[in-house]
Amino acid sequence: MAKGHVEKLFKPPEKVLLKLAIPVILANGFQTLYNFMDAFWVSILKNSRYALSGIGLAMPFAFALIAISNGIGVGTNSLLSRKIGARDKKTADRGATVGFTLSILVGLFLGLLLFVLSSWIFNSISGGPAAQNAIRYANIIFIGAPFLFISNLLASILRAEGDMKRSMLALATGSVLNIVLDPVLIFGLGMGIKGAALATIISRALTILPLSFWIFKEKSSYIRPCIKKMNLNLKLSFEILKVGIPASLSLLFMSLGVFLFNTLIQKVYGPEGVAVYITGNRISSIAVLPALGIQAAVITLTGAWFGAKRVDMVKRTVLHAYKAGVLMEFLIGVVIFFFSKQIGSIFVHNVSMKALLPEISRYLKIAALGYPFMPISMFSAGTFNGTGKSVYALLLTLFRVIIIAYTAAVIYSVFLNLGLLGIWLGMFTGTVVASLFGVFLLKIKHIL
């Protein structure tokens, strides 16, 4: 079975790209559903404003852990895919062992460090009930950080060899378990906000079980890290971190972008504008799920073909991904554009938010125009990650979010006095220009 997954990587990308992408799309869909349900259960707690504020304070730190763990996962995925392409299974096994070691050590170190500093961090930021809720929630997340790192790493090993289905099955099961555990721990056992955090950690820990069984016990994976030989081989660690650090920074830049836009919107329009942005962004996060799934497949496929020294097939993979992704997101964009008000109303549950529905609709219409361009920059970044050139992926993210989108939003909203419309147009501008920049970068690196 494992060998079959690997051989599938070297079939024409037109035949395998979507087969690899669909399981990832499903896994991401379950994760998105969990995020929605988690926020819902916390929102109906007594004094929920303090609970939500506490989670809001903790989220940048939780997101940083996710970004770093994903970075190590992407770095390991890229290395292993390239070694599979080069038919160097021995180094692939060693690389998986190094990635596993890195994940455990970094997860333990960061989790312990943040746990020790959490009281000081949150009391310095806020104080009062919000800070106390942040400490209660974050401390459990920090203690469970190693589970996040290990589960992401093991899933990355399976993705690197093309075994997207079992990776999806484990991660989706974890998300469903989280959804089930949330009300039980939050309300059934009366744990409140601690229950939300504990549900997350338990589900992550249990996700590790099937992944570990397949890789270590059953040995049905193609790539097999060895726990007995855990090490930090300098060369392989560098290869992983060379991709992993820029990949982590890309996610952190996107988080910084959200912060900058929230700040700008607050100045231009006030808290109501932020509510519009958060609601619209939530809908957009669902709309781009197909593109995210294809991007994961692009990393694996381009890595394998690049390792096999078949740049022609890397190019073929990217071009096919562009076609499939643009078509999917175009169709999604059409639906959201013409039904923006109806879709926005799904996420509007009180009188104050209903007054913002016209602005939410306008946000969605402008965002929908950018959906067909988004896959181009995403898949360009995925190709750079897959081929081990992730500094260019980082540059592309920085260019899109900060240099173009935010700068354009400031110019349109402040200097041209377009208000919120200018901010939405700035985001659209960033998406379009970044797609062109991504193609340009691939061309000058002789990939397209």
Image (cartoon, helix red, strand yellow):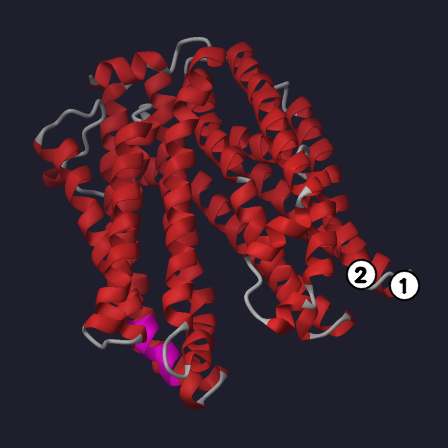
Q: Quadrant of residue 36?
A: bottom left
* Residue bounds of the magenta highlight: 132-139
Q: Quadrant of residue 188?
A: bottom left
Q: Residue furthest bottom?
A: 128
Is residue 153 placed above or below 16 in the rendered structure?
A: below
Q: Is residue 420 visible?
A: yes
* Residue placed under numbered mark 2 in the picture: 410
Q: Is residue 336 left or right of residue 196?
A: right
Front in this rendered view, residue 274 or 184 = 184
Q: Quadrant of residue 89?
A: top left
* Disc 2 packing (10 Å; few <14; some 14–19; many ≥20): many
Please name the amino acid that badge 1 sits on: Phe
Please name the amino acid that badge 2 sits on: Val
* Residue placed under numbered mark 1 in the picture: 415
Badge 1 vs badge 2, beta-carbon distance below 8 Å: yes
Residue shown at 22%/37% (left/top)? 97
Point out residue 46 in the picture as x, y percentages from the top left corner.
37, 82
Q: Secondary structure at mark 1?
A: helix
Determine if the magenta segment contains residue 427. Answer: no
